[in-house]
Image: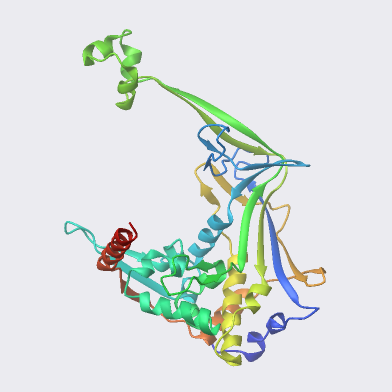
C-alpha cells in the first residue's frame, strides 16, 4: 500500500495537547444472549475472597440504584479477546503486528511447543520472553522507554504491549517499567437476577441393583470413596447463570492522553509511532469479537441498538464519530512504520530458567 500523506495525517490533530484537546474515543455496544432478550447466560465465576461469604465460586455483582449488575467480561479478558484478532492463523489483523514465535523443548523426546508472544499473558514482560534469546531485545526496548522515553523499539517487537499495557514487574530489564493500557474494555449486565441450579447423579448400576449391593460387591462401606469412581450418588448445587432485565453493554475507551505519551527518538519517528499504535488501538476497539465468551455465554449485538462511538474533548464535550475507513488507515500506518513481515523464530531457554532458580536459592541462603 502506497502511503497517502493526507490519509496518514487524518488524525494528527488528536496528537496535540491543550485546552481543546481530544482525550478519548468511547464506544458502547449493546449485546443480547443468543437465545434472545431475557435469556439465561453465564458470567465468569471467581473464587470468593470474603471469609464469611458463600463458599465456592461466585459471580462478581454490585448493587446499584437501578438494580444489581454483574461483570460479564473483565478488562483483562477483553484484552485477550482483542489480541486474538492479531493472532495467526485466523486472526483477521495478523499481518499488522510482528509475529514472534518461541519454541520450547519438552522432556522425553516429545515434540517441542511453539508459542506466539501474542499468547503471553504479560506480553513483552512475560517469562516467555524473559527466558529466551529474545531477552536482550526486550530489555533494550524497556530501557529505551525508561531512559530515553523512546517507545519505538517496543513497538517493533510487541506493539500490543503499548495498546493493552505492559509492566516489567520483576524488573528483568533493570527497571520496573510500566506502560498503562491505552485501550480498556469490559462487558457488564444490568438489573440482573442470579439463578441457581441443582443436579443429582445416580450411577446406572445403582438404579439396577438393590441397596447395598454395590458396597457388598466392592467390600466398601463408604459411598464417598465410591463416588470418586462414579459408582455412588453425587448431588451438586451451584450457580445457574443470570437473567438480565437491563442492558448488557460492552464499553470500550481508547485514551488519547496515553497515545500522546508515546514518543519516538525524534519528531518524525514519533508521528509514525503514534499513527501506527492509534490504528491498532482503533481496530481493537471496533473489530467484531467472537460471540462465545465461555460455555453458556454466547452474546451477539443487539440489532435494535447500533453501537455508538463518541469523541470526547477535554472540556467534556462529546461528538459522534464515524470509524469507517479505520482499517485502511491502520494498514497504511503499519506500512509507514515498517512492521516486520513473516514469523520471527526464537527459542525459549530452559537453562536460563535453571540459572534464575539457582541464583534465587543462593540469594536465599545468604539472607538466611
Residue 355, image x and y in percent? 27, 66
Question: Is residue 87 at least partly visible in the picture?
Answer: no
Residue 73, image x and y in percent? 58, 51
Q: Please, which colouring scheme is shown?
A: rainbow
Residue 80, compared with residue 325, is above or below; it is above
In this orientation, which residue lies closer to the viewer: 56 or 365? Answer: 365
User: Residue at left 30%, top 11%?
Assistant: 209
Residue 102, image x and y in percent? 33, 69
Image quadrant assignment for residue 282: bottom right
Image quadrant assignment for residue 63: top right
Question: Is residue 136 at least partly visible in the picture?
Answer: yes
The C terminus - image quarter: bottom left
Apparent side of residue 24 relative to residue 297 in the rendered image (left or right): right
User: Residue at left 70%, top 58%?
Assistant: 28
Q: How many marks?
A: 0
User: Residue at left 58%, top 91%?
Assistant: 266
Residue lying farthest to the left in this orientation: 108
Residue 261, image x and y in percent? 63, 78
Apparent side of residue 57 relative to residue 267 in the rendered image (left or right): left
User: Residue at left 52%, top 32%?
Assistant: 55
Residue 89, compared with residue 345, is above or below; it is above
In this orientation, which residue lies closer to the viewer: 330 or 312? Answer: 312
Amino acid at each position: 500500500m502506497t502511503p497517502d500523506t493526507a490519509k496518514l495525517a487524518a488524525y494528527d490533530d488528536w496528537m496535540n495537547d491543550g485546552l481543546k484537546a481530544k482525550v478519548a474515543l468511547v464506544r458502547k455496544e449493546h449485546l443480547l444472549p443468543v437465545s434472545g432478550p431475557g435469556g439465561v447466560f453465564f458470567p465468569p465465576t471467581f473464587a470468593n475472597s470474603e471469609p464469611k461469604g458463600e463458599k465456592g465460586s461466585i459471580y462478581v455483582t454490585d448493587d446499584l440504584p437501578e438494580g444489581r449488575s454483574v461483570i460479564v467480561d473483565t478488562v483483562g479478558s477483553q484484552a485477550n479477546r482483542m489480541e486474538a484478532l492479531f493472532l495467526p492463523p485466523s486472526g483477521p489483523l495478523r499481518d499488522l503486528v510482528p509475529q514472534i514465535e518461541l519454541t520450547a523443548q519438552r522432556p522425553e523426546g516429545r515434540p517441542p511447543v511453539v508459542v506466539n508472544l501474542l499468547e503471553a499473558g504479560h506480553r513483552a514482560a512475560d517469562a516467555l520472553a524473559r527466558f529466551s534469546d529474545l531477552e536482550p531485545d526486550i530489555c533494550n526496548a524497556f530501557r529505551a522507554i525508561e531512559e530515553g522515553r523512546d517507545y519505538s523499539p517496543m513497538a517493533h517487537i510487541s506493539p500490543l504491549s503499548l495498546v493493552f499495557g505492559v509492566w516489567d514487574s520483576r524488573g528483568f530489564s533493570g527497571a520496573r517499567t510500566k506502560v498503562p493500557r491505552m485501550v480498556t474494555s469490559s462487558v457488564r449486565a444490568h438489573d440482573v437476577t442470579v439463578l441457581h441450579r441443582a443436579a443429582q447423579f445416580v450411577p446406572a448400576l445403582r438404579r439396577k441393583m438393590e441397596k447395598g449391593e454395590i458396597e457388598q460387591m466392592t467390600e466398601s462401606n463408604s459411598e464417598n470413596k465410591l463416588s470418586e469412581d462414579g459408582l455412588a450418588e453425587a448431588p451438586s448445587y451451584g450457580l445457574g447463570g443470570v437473567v438480565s432485565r437491563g442492558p448488557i453493554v460492552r464499553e470500550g475507551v481508547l485514551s488519547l492522553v496515553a497515545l500522546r505519551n508515546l514518543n519516538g527518538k525524534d519528531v518524525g519517528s514519533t508521528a509514525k509511532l503514534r499513527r501506527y499504535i492509534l490504528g491498532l488501538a482503533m481496530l481493537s476497539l471496533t473489530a467484531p469479537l467472537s460471540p462465545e465468551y465461555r460455555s453458556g455465554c454466547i452474546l451477539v449485538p443487539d440489532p435494535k441498538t447500533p453501537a455508538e462511538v463518541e469523541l470526547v474533548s477535554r472540556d467534556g464535550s462529546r461528538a459522534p464519530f464515524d470509524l469507517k475507513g479505520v482499517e485502511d488507515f491502520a494498514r497504511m500506518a503499519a506500512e509507514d512504520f515498517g512492521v516486520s513481515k513473516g514469523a520471527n523464530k526464537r527459542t525459549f531457554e530452559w537453562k536460563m530458567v535453571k540459572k534464575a532458580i539457582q541464583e534465587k536459592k543462593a540469594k536465599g541462603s545468604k539472607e538466611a
